[in-house]
Image (spheres, helix red, strand yellow):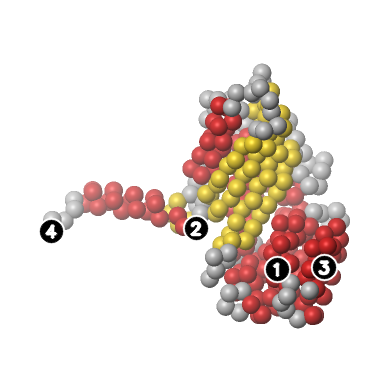
Amino acid sequence: MRKLPFLLVFIVSALANVQLYAQELNAKVNVNYSKLENTKTDIFSKLQTTIEEFLNNHKWTEIAFRDNEKIQCNFNLTIDEYNVNDNTFKCALLMSSNRPVFNSNYNTVCYSVNDKEFVFKFSEFDQLEYQENQIDNNLVALLAYYAYMIIGMDLDSMTPKGGTACFQTAENIVSAGQNLDYPGWKAFSDNGNRFGLLNDYLDGSMEPLREFQYIYHRKGLDQMAENPDTARAVITEGLDLLLQAYKAKNMNKIAQLFTEYKRPELVNIYSGKGTTEEKNKAYDVLFTIDASQNQEWEKIKK
């Protein structure tokens, strides 16, 4: 058999590496415009396609992600208002990202937010381009911010504080957002907005929570298939870190946000399983963090 010419071998190898080390995100975008009446729908289809391509085709970090390691995430955009005259969209974004649990077919929610101030301008022929040092388009800023938050949270679940570099980039985007005159970016206007949540997450007092992120996923969930009792015990012990973070900074919403998107999973870890001591500790911690969900936390004791 003849040998392939060197140039051809090089090209084949390069293409193989492109497929092997792909972009970080596999985002699915859904644009819901059911609240609107008498509006042409072409713009919404274009918006959906443009957002999806932007999130999936951009290489956000220098980390080598294999194709099967792409982070699965969903962007569900509900349009509340659309002004056809100035191309302004006022929306609510429900975003979640998932992470596979080792040795199982189960995917766990790694990050989820409900952003009710997702406001931007977009017209049919707009091209989205992200340049870290020049952010003057709010839709680009919004999507880039969440891309880095998703990747950062995923990395935090894999290695202790592994997502720091991503969060620092997200912090730069938040700083740029201060000059864009759109809601959700302003410092100290709302401790649950994009600035508030990221600022709290990077606060030194939140390091116990970031440590818990790693313990919960890598030492807990990822070991659950092989040794569920040990994994549950590790998670239970780690809940002290979650409670510590909750108490460390007045009015921060980070620990409560974690319990919101992990609620069904946390209940399942303990409901009908574990020791009485584990159940009682889990209940006490979770009730302290979010008493409004007591009906769900009560299931832990059963």
Give x and y (percent) for residue 187. 78, 41
Q: Secondary structure at mark 3?
A: helix
Instruction: Using residue 286 as the reference point, say whether residue 107 is left or right of it.
Output: left
Q: Amino acid at mark 1?
A: Asn
User: Alpha-carbon neighbours of circle 3 within 10 Å: few (<14), some, or many (≥20)?
Assistant: some
Of the pair 169 and 142, the residue shown nearer to us: 142
Q: Nearer the viewer, mark 4 or mark 1?
A: 1
Quadrant where the image shows the C terminus: bottom right
Decide which of tag 4 and tag 1 comes sooner along the chain.
4
Q: Are marks 3 and 4 in contact (CB under 8 Å)?
A: no
Quadrant where the image shows the N terminus: bottom left
Q: Which residue is mark 2?
A: 69
Give x and y (percent) for residue 152. 62, 54
Q: Amino acid at mark 3?
A: Glu
Of the pair 157 and 101, the residue shown nearer to us: 101
Q: Amino acid at mark 2?
A: Glu
